[in-house]
Image: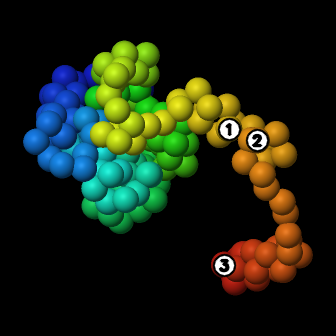
Amino acid sequence: MTMYRDEFMQRALALSAQALDTPGTEPFGAVVVKDGAVVGEGFNHSVAHFDPTSHGEIEAIRDACRNLKTVDLAGCTLYTSCEPCALCAAAMHIAGIGQLYYAASMVQSGAAFEGVPVAARHPIDVEALRAEAGAPFAARALPAEQRRDAEAVEILRAWAAARRG
């Protein structure tokens, strides 16, 4: 477990504050830290990039992976201006982030955004996202059907076989 360092949270908050003057952004900033240095930064560009996955944490993870030329961020810590949603938590898990520090909670950010028109932000139903993300597809609200699995499995096996040596 890494020790909290306030300068990294200050940087995440400074990135978050960029949304005050940057059209198409929202106030969610994050930094990825490895061995005491920032290796990735990001803030929310969902509206500007027409990308619903462009959250601050996702952008910081993408930046860190590019900078380190890896998809394995084991040993890294993520500092973020707001408690991560299920999408960002999943990305952190996939990337191997080992420690998280966050500022505002989901409840606090929801209260702060109360009354902001949907047209002015990219709304996320956090509770629905948490429920959907953790459920098997058969139990999710999104209709889903499995098709042509045998062909897909053959491609997966061929790819894996080529890498086994």
The amino acid beneath tag 1 is Glu
Identify the residue position indicated by label 3 in the image.
Answer: 163
User: Front-most of 23 and 106?
Assistant: 23
Circle number at residue 132: 1
User: Front-most of 123 and 78?
Assistant: 123
How far apart are labels 3 and 1 at the CA level? 33 Å
> Earlier along the polypeptide chain: callout 2 or callout 3?
2
Identify the residue position indicated by label 2 in the image.
Answer: 140
Does residue 102 appear in the picture of this structure? no
> Earlier along the polypeptide chain: callout 2 or callout 1?
1
Circle number at residue 48: none
Say which element carries label 2. Answer: loop
Q: Which residue is drawn at 53% across and 32% down?
A: 125
The amino acid beneath tag 2 is Arg
Residue 48 location (% of width, % of height): 28, 56
Q: Which of marks 3 and 1 is in front?
A: 1
Residue 83 lies, with reference to residue 72, above or below; the image says above
Residue 37 location (% of width, % of height): 21, 43
Quadrant, the N terminus: top left
